Amino acid sequence: MLKSKGLWYLMMGGALAGWAFIVAGLVKPFEDEKLKKFWKQILLVWVLGHPLEMLLSMRIGRAAGVSPVKTAVKTMLFGFTWWLPLKLKVFK
């Protein structure tokens, strides 16, 4: 299942949905306290997690022949849903 391109594309869509949720909360802050708390948790994970993943993704991107800029952009957008399938050779 981890070798399925469809799975990883679906997960990348989920990462983009996470960013859309973050932007929506920035544009029009949520009034519901539970939703606001969830938004803050997602924001924390995305904003801290994706840059920390650069430590792994740069090495993986370099080994796969992907430029550092492309690796950085894709890691920030998609996180592990981009670099892990690259490492597993699901994506060439």
Image: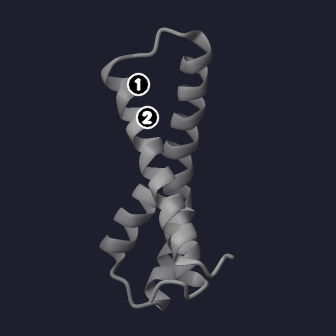
Residue in view at x 56 percent, y 64 percent: 80
Can residue 3 be seen by looking at this rendering? yes
Image quarter of residue 11: bottom right
Amino acid on which the number 1 mark rests in the picture: Gly
Residue in view at x 40 percent, y 24 percent: 25
Closest to the observer: 23 or 72? 23
Amino acid on which the number 2 mark rests in the picture: Phe
Mark sitting on residue 63:
none
Mark sitting on residue 21:
2
Q: Label 2 near label 1: C-beta < 8 Å?
A: yes
Residue in view at x 66 percent, y 76 percent: 2
Q: Residue 39, position in %: x, y?
A: 53, 27
Q: Residue 46, position in %: x, y?
A: 52, 45
Question: Quick one: label 2, few (<14), some, or many (20+) residues within 10 Å?
Answer: some
Residue in view at x 44 percent, y 89 percent: 92
Q: Quadrant of the N terminus?
A: bottom right
Q: Residue 63, position in %: x, y?
A: 49, 90
Q: Residue 30, position in %: x, y?
A: 45, 15
* The furthest residue to the right: 1
Question: Quick one: label 1, few (<14), some, or many (20+) residues within 10 Å?
Answer: some
Can residue 55 be seen by looking at this rendering? no
Total of numbered circles in the picture?
A: 2
Above or below residue 57? Residue 17 is above
Q: How is the image coloured?
A: one colour
Dot 2 falls on a residue whose secondary structure is helix
Closest to the observer: 37 or 7? 7
Q: Which residue is mark 1?
A: 25
Give left or right: position of 29 versus 85.
left
Above or below residue 36? Residue 44 is below
Dot 1 falls on a residue whose secondary structure is helix
